[in-house]
Image (cartoon, grey):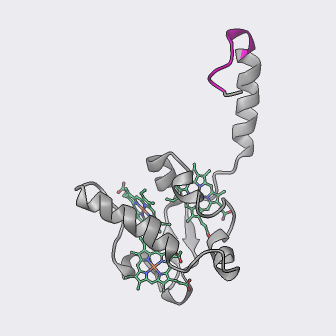
Amino acid sequence: MSCNTVGVALATLALGVCVTLAAAVSQGPSHIDIFGGQSGKVPFPHIQHQERLKDCNVCHSVFPQATDAIKKMKEQGALKPKKVMNVQCIKCHREEKQAGKPHGPVTCSTCHAK
Ligand code: HEC
Ligand code: HEC
Ligand code: HEC
């Protein structure tokens, strides 16, 4: 049952259920320092991306919504180093830049803080 397809009779009850579910889902911190190995951590404005992109799965289809998920997957060999960086972060920032829109950093030292 989706929150916006319920009948009028059930609307009040369903609203309660949806509010409860929404409260149970963690949004994660508004700012995250992503593990970047020897290249240095990457300060990341999580909330700014959530608000702008809306769809969590733009990023979380590749790694779960969990603390240090990227670091753990790399340690387990489940994710290649630099994959998130190249396929998500830099790819999107370059596309936005080419489209003349506001975009995130595309150079190493702007992202990696030593
Ligand atoms: C632009 C990419 C991106 C988007 C979009 C995004 N996230 Fe994240 N999220 C990340 C990154 C990067 C991490 C940190 C992973 C790590 O530290 O290994 C993270 C971590 C998290 C965590 C764990 C945080 C912690 O340290 O405990 C949660 C929870 C989370 N995200 C929820 C969400 C939700 C909910 C949405 C959608 C509303 C969302 N994220 C959208 C990139 C994104
Ligand atoms: C848009 C931000 C961004 C830019 C620009 C960027 N990086 Fe990254 N980089 C990251 C993130 C986030 C990670 C961690 C996730 C991953 O490994 O994909 C990372 C990971 C890495 C890693 C792997 C670290 C490890 O031990 O797993 C290396 C090496 C690296 N970057 C080097 C570079 C170099 C060199 C450049 C410039 C050519 C660069 N990065 C530009 C965000 C960025
Ligand atoms: C699908 C597109 C997309 C993805 C994926 C994405 N970004 Fe961004 N990012 C943006 C846009 C758009 C902006 C510019 C937002 C603005 O200026 O309002 C931005 C801005 C930023 C900024 C600058 C924030 C500021 O205050 O100036 C940083 C740092 C950043 N992104 C890091 C990352 C990292 C690290 C990743 C990968 C984990 C990532 N982004 C993934 C679209 C994306």
The answer to which image quadrant residue 98 occupies is bottom left
Residue 32: image quadrant is: bottom right
* 80 relative position to 109: left or right: right
Is 106 on the left or on the right of 71, as rendered?
left
Looking at the image, in which quadrant does ligand 1 appear? bottom right
Location of residue 16 in the rendering, given as x and y in whole percent from the top left corner: 75, 26
What residue do we see at 71% from left, 32% from top? Answer: 19
**Drawn side of residue 39 relative to residue 22, left or right:** left
Over which residues does the magenta segment extend?
A: 3-10
In the rendered image, the vertical position of residue 38 relative to residue 81, given as above or below: below
**Residue 64 versus residue 50 in the image, above or below:** below
Rendered residue at 63%/51% (across/down):
27
Q: Is residue 4 magenta?
A: yes
Front residue of 51 and 88? 88
Residue 8, image x, y percentages: 68, 10
Q: Is 81 located above or below residue 9 in the figure? A: below
Residue 33 percent location from the top left of the image: 56, 72
Left or right: 96 in relation to 100: right
Numbered disc total: 0
Q: Residue at x 55, y 63 (%)?
A: 31
Q: Nearer the viewer, residue 75 or 41?
A: 75
Prevailing SS of the magenta stretch: loop
Residue 93 x, y percent position in the rendering: 35, 63
Q: Residue at x 56, y 73 (%)?
A: 34
